[in-house]
């Protein structure tokens, strides 16, 4: 099959591309910030067809792609010419089976490079079919008239009937908001630029930076609400005010205080709220007024497009760009057929969705940047999902990622939990805050487990605003308790494991969170690899620390991004590479059973001299194993091998002060929950403790947390740390019998259990499996568990 996607002059000889003066094809391995070659060699895909991706190259004006069945190209399954960017998703599904693909580039004179090396992949038997419609077909689905964001013109009669009937309460809330806006319209004077000489990231800068965002949203989202409600049958005054706000905001300098490149936190909401309002009040605008709006959005849209395209297709890990691309898609749909470049904006956004989204996970549903950014970014993405479905008939929830996405908050934050694991802005997150988004995901996907999670916390409240109204007609999903699910889960794509005793209630749960990530420490998922956290019975025991006073501040950069801020290990005071993709970890073993969980991570390559990618490696290994003997024992076993004699520092953090008079009896109490910690190896640790950060956050932040550092007694090239943690409710008996013996090839740890039994753990020093044997009080052994590293 041959798909002509872009007209390109190509020299043809007997049906073949001319190979005069072939170019050298750049097939260097993908860099850390690059999307790389997809499908990767030997990958098995749950989506058909794949989104193909390869390295972009200057001087190439078009690409050719071939995909053969099996290991050769004798029988082509698919072929496409004239591909504009270095990504491509075919317009039809591939049958399950094995395939091999290759590509080549064509320059402006029609010369072709050599073919790339072949890369093989497989389509799974149960793969989801989700081909990408060709450009003309996709754009042709957009309504010719307005509204065309979140709804189509033909949807209005149905929505009006709902507003008068079963959804009257939601409509009345929209009317009440519009009446409030009529009585007190938002200001529309253009917000200020930063004054000359203002220091970036200062408190004064922060007020203008974020203040211009909230000011813009108040004006233009208010206008969108007025315009939408009028479409449902609301007062004409609503539309008149919406039009006035829209035209007032159209007077703002598109490259000024709310320009995308000047302040994207104001420029992005300007773009999509302006576009929504324009589509909702289109029939109220004169042709001259429409042209005014088009001129404004041509400038703003072009600025976004030039920043994002094609860079985001090959380097998709920039945080803000991961929402900007679909906001640009909204603008393109709103101005389809009215701004010449608008169709390019839509086509670019569609290519991002089909080929390079989501970036912070794989199909398993995790999220590298943490639950706060997951909620923010996935929540905003659902707007684009609604827009695509209404305007172009594309169901985003067919993607395999969305069949798993709700399990991420469910495992990380069981009902009632406070604190959101690892990632930026998570310490004050609560499970209850996940309810609105998980409720939407449950409704969109029909997943009963996620609906159960929502109902455990009282159910989702009816979503407000015009988006809530459009979504209000989704069918109810029947809740399904997670009795058929394991309590613990590994999200391998992000290198995070969540070990739980129960998914039902955080007040009854003991939980360990562990990270060793192929994403490294980049972006908002900056915590060091092999970090762990410990929660028990509703309390945060061993925590990640710091408070983001403003992004990139001295405290944020030099404390929160550093290995010192988490439960981890530094080498002669140096931690892993900060906020970088090269400082990677990986999960090398994971096993979960009802009584024992084991996860093992490797992060040695994340330590380099001076924290630089090209620095010499400090460690040959840093292997951390977490053994969770449910619910009462957490064993943390570390093996480190350096390239020269060095010192090692072991860090633990808590909201309250540790009692650390003896390394075998470190105690912590948080509320009505305690934790006893025995640092069994090495002997001779020296302790220091402080409630100060280095550096502290800005004076307006009063938070302080406790940081315990245990330093090894002497420099050495290799070392093992063995820590045993016993979380418990105050008043419950806590066994004190535990022993660590050194044996040939490793250690044997024996520890008493609350039921009178004991556990024996074999910990290898170098290679070999971890072996766990559990005995009841009569000495009867359960089936031993062996876990080997991969």
Image (cartoon, rainbow, N blue to C red):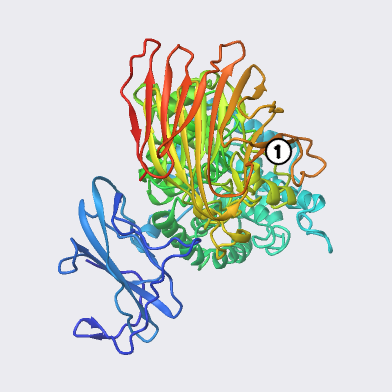
- Image mark count: 1
Q: Is residue 569 visible?
A: yes
Residue depicted at 49% across the width and 56% down the height: 333
Q: Which residue is mark 1?
A: 181
Reply above or below: 176 against 361: above
Q: Nearer the viewer, residue 461 or 392?
A: 461
Mark 1: secondary structure: helix
Q: Nearer the viewer, residue 84 or 203?
A: 203
For the N terminus, the image quarter is bottom left
- As drawn, is 62 to the left or to the right of 751? left
Asked which quadrant contains residue 192, the reply is bottom right
In the image, residue 67 lies at what x, y percent? 24, 65
In the image, residue 269 lies at what x, y percent? 62, 51
In the image, residue 223 lies at what x, y percent? 65, 45
In the image, residue 147 lies at what x, y percent? 50, 49
Is the residue marked by circle 1 packed among few (<14), some (14-19), or many (20+) residues within 10 Å? Answer: some
Reply above or below: 448 against 274: above
Asked which quadrant contains residue 667, the reply is top right
Reply above or below: 136 against 164: below
Q: Is residue 320 visible?
A: no
């Amino acid at each position: 099959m041959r798909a002509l996607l872009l007209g390109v002059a190509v020299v043809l000889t007997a049906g073949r591309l001319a190979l005069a003066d072939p170019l050298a094809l750049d097939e260097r391995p993908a860099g850390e910030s690059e999307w790389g070659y997809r499908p990767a060699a030997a990958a098995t895909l749950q989506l058909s067809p794949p989104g193909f991706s390869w390295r972009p190259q200057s001087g190439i004006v078009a690409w050719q792609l071939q995909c053969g069945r099996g290991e050769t190209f004798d029988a082509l399954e698919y072929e496409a010419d004239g591909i504009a960017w270095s990504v491509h998703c075919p317009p039809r599904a591939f049958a399950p089976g094995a395939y091999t693909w290759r590509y080549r580039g064509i320059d402006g004179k029609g010369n072709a490079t050599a073919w790339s090396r072949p890369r093989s992949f497989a389509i799974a038997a149960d793969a989801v079919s989700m081909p990408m419609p060709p450009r003309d077909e996709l754009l042709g689905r957009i309504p010719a008239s307005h509204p065309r964001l979140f709804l189509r013109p033909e949807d209005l009669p149905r929505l009006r009937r709902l507003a008068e009937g079963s959804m009257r309460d939601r409509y009345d809330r929209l009317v009440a908001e519009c009446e409030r806006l009529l009585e007190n319209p938002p200001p529309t004077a253009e917000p200020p630029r930063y004054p000359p000489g203002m220091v970036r990231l200062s408190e004064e800068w922060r007020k203008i930076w974020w203040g211009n965002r909230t000011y813009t949203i108040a004006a233009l989202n208010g206008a969108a609400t007025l315009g939408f409600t009028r479409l449902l049958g609301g007062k004409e005054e609503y539309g008149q005010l919406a039009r006035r706000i829209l035209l007032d905001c159209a007077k703002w300098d598109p490259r000024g205080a709310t320009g995308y490149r000047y302040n994207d936190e104001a420029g992005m909401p300007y773009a999509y709220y302006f576009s929504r309002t324009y589509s909702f009040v289109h029939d109220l605008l004169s042709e001259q007024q429409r042209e005014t709006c088009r001129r404004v959005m041509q400038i703003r849209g072009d600025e976004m497009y030039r920043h994002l395209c094609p860079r985001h297709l090959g380097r998709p890990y920039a945080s803000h760009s991961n929402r900007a691309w679909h906001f640009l898609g909204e603008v393109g749909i709103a101005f389809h057929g009215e701004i010449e470049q608008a169709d390019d904006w839509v086509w670019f956004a569609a290519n991002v969705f089909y080929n390079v989204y989501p970036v912070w996970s794989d199909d398993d549903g995790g999220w590298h940047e943490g639950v706060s950014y997951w909620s923010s970014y996935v929540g905003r993405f659902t707007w684009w999902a609604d827009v695509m479905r209404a305007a172009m008939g594309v169901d985003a929830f067919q993607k395999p990622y969305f069949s798993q996405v709700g399990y991420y908050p469910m495992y990380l934050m069981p009902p009632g939990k406070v604190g959101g694991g690892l990632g930026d802005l998570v310490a004050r997150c609560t499970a209850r805050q996940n309810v609105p988004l998980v409720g939407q995901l449950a409704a969109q996907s029909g997943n009963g487990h996620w609906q159960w999670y929502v109902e455990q916390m009282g159910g989702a409240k009816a979503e407000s605003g015009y988006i809530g109204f459009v979504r209000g007609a989704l069918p109810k999903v029947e809740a399904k308790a997670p009795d058929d699910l394991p309590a613990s889960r590994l999200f391998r794509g992000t290198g995070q494991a969540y070990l739980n005793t129960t998914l039902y209630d955080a007040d009854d749960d003991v939980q360990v969170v562990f990270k060793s990530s192929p994403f490294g420490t980049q972006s908002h998922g900056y915590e060091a690899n092999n970090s762990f956290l410990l929660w028990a019975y509703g309390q945060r025991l061993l925590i990640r620390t710091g408070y983001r006073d403003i992004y990139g501040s001295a405290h944020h950069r030099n404390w929160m991004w550093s290995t010192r801020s988490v439960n981890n290990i530094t080498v002669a005071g140096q931690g892993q590479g900060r906020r970088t993709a090269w400082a990677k970890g990986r999960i090398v073993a994971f096993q979960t059973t009802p009584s024992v969980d084991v996860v093992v991570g490797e992060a040695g390559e994340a330590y380099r001299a001076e924290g630089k990618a090209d620095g010499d490696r400090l460690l040959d290994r840093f292997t951390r194993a977490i053994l969770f003997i449910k619910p009462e024992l957490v064993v943390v076993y570390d093996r480190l091998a350096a390239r020269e004699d060095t010192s090692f520092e072991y860090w633990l953090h808590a909201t309250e002060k540790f009692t650390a008079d003896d390394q075998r009896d470190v105690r912590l109490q948080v509320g009505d929950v305690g934790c006893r910690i025995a640092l069994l190896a090495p002997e001779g640790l020296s302790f220091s403790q402080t409630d100060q950060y280095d550096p502290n956050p800005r004076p307006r932040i009063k938070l302080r947390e406790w940081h315990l550092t245990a330093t090894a007694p002497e420099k050495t090239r290799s070392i093992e740390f063995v820590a045993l943690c016993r979380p418990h409710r105050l008043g419950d008996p806590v066994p004190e019998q535990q022993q660590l013996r050194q044996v040939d090839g490793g250690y044997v740890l024996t520890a008493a259990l609350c039921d009178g039994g004991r556990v024996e753990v074999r910990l290898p020093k170098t290679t070999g499996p971890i072996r766990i044997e559990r005995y009841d009080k009569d000495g009867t052994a359960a089936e031993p568990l062996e876990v080997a590293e991969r």
